[in-house]
Image (cartoon, rainbow, N blue to C red):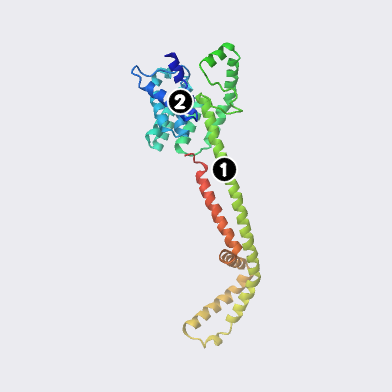
Amino acid sequence: MFSELMSFDEVPRYLLSSDAELRRKALNLLEAEINRREGVRRPWGSIEQFIVALYHKVFVNNDAEAGKLLLNYLNKVMPSVRNTLPPEVQEATDIILYAVQAKLEGIDINMAIKRIQEMRTTTQVSELVKGVTIVELMGKYDESIKTLLNKVTSDTEKKLQYLATLLNDPDFKEIANYFLLDLDMTYAEEPKWVYTIWGYFIKRATELQNIYKERKKIIDKIEAEYQELERKYNEIVESMSNQIKKVLPIVINLVASLLTMPYESIRIYSGIVTFIFIILYILVRQLRDIIINTNVISTIAKSIAEFGVKFIKKEGRELLKQLEIKKAELRDLEDKLKTFR
């Protein structure tokens, strides 16, 4: 019986392994324990490693089979171990078990998040668990994770120093080895699996932050490329616009000279043609000086240049195609930036 329990304590490690054979062994051990007629037994080691494994299998690995078995086991064993856990672990466990259940059973996300937000949290650790869990249920990153993470990690060094003190005691080290406890003393420098809730959620929050930062870097790079293409396109438009501005006054004056003939000379025309000439005559006489002597001509020149670059100039057409591609990339990346699903 003792050897069976010791093997059962390996379930979290087996499940977190990439080895398919170990995963199957862990699932078989879990199923056998759940189906015991005498009822489930609590592990010799910490229950926290089972809670961590449950969260990771469901939210990170999307392993519903392992998640359902772990949740079933924990729901049965928790009544006998809950009161032995520190307050922050009790609070965090309540959040994790409900969040996992919500995901596995397809409970409405908004309702699940509202319920988690209302759950009691009196420590920084349980606040971090709440924050990370809500982010993963939403599938979107939230900047509040950074604040929560900073609060918890400020206390991490003290915990590591405490563990280091314990490990200096030969008796404690022997007990730790005997129960196969995974005490990671180098977490800050070299992230490894930490089978404690506070350790795991520091790691997971850091991972989510890093995913966000990496995606933000890619977006910044694409945005810079987009702005460079836009600058080149605007240079071409500006160049053509300057050329048009030189020619446009000449054209306007030429048209004006043709239209501003004495009224008597256009009486020979009749009907609609006469009416059009009269309207053009009035417009050109009234607006010629305004157009030529103000920024209106610049606006007209720029509009003509934009049309020319867009539809006539080959280099402009190519740049516009590239700009559309970059714009589509940016839209896609911005949609994915905060998404973890």
Q: Which quadrant is home to the N terminus?
A: top left
Label 1: element kind: helix
Give the farthest residue toward the bottom: 268
Above or below, 91 against 265 in this view is above
Residue occupying image coordinates x 41% and y 34%: 103
Residue 216, numbered circle: 1
Instruction: Estimate the spatial distance between the alpha carbons at disc 2 and disc 1, rounded to whole Å.
Output: 32 Å
Amino acid type of the residue that numbered disc 2 sits on in the rendered structure:
Ile
Residue 339, numbered circle: none
Label 1 crowd (10 A; few <14 / some 14-19 / many >=20): some
Q: Could one spot residue 311 in this view of the protein?
A: yes
User: Percent x, y for residue 278?
Assistant: 52, 80
Residue bearing mark 2: 51
Of badges 2 and 1, the one in the foreground is 2
Residue occupying image coordinates x 54% and y 56%: 324
Horizontal side, residue 221 vs residue 111: left or right = right
Amino acid type of the residue that numbered disc 1 sits on in the rendered structure:
Lys
Kindly indicate the quadrant of the structure image that contains residue 176.
Answer: top right
Q: Could one spot residue 121 in this view of the protein?
A: no
Label 2: element kind: helix
In front of the other: 74 or 289: 74
Above or below, 255 against 112 in this view is below
User: Percent x, y for residue 179?
Assistant: 50, 16
User: Percent x, y for residue 71?
Assistant: 40, 27
In front of the other: 338 or 268: 338
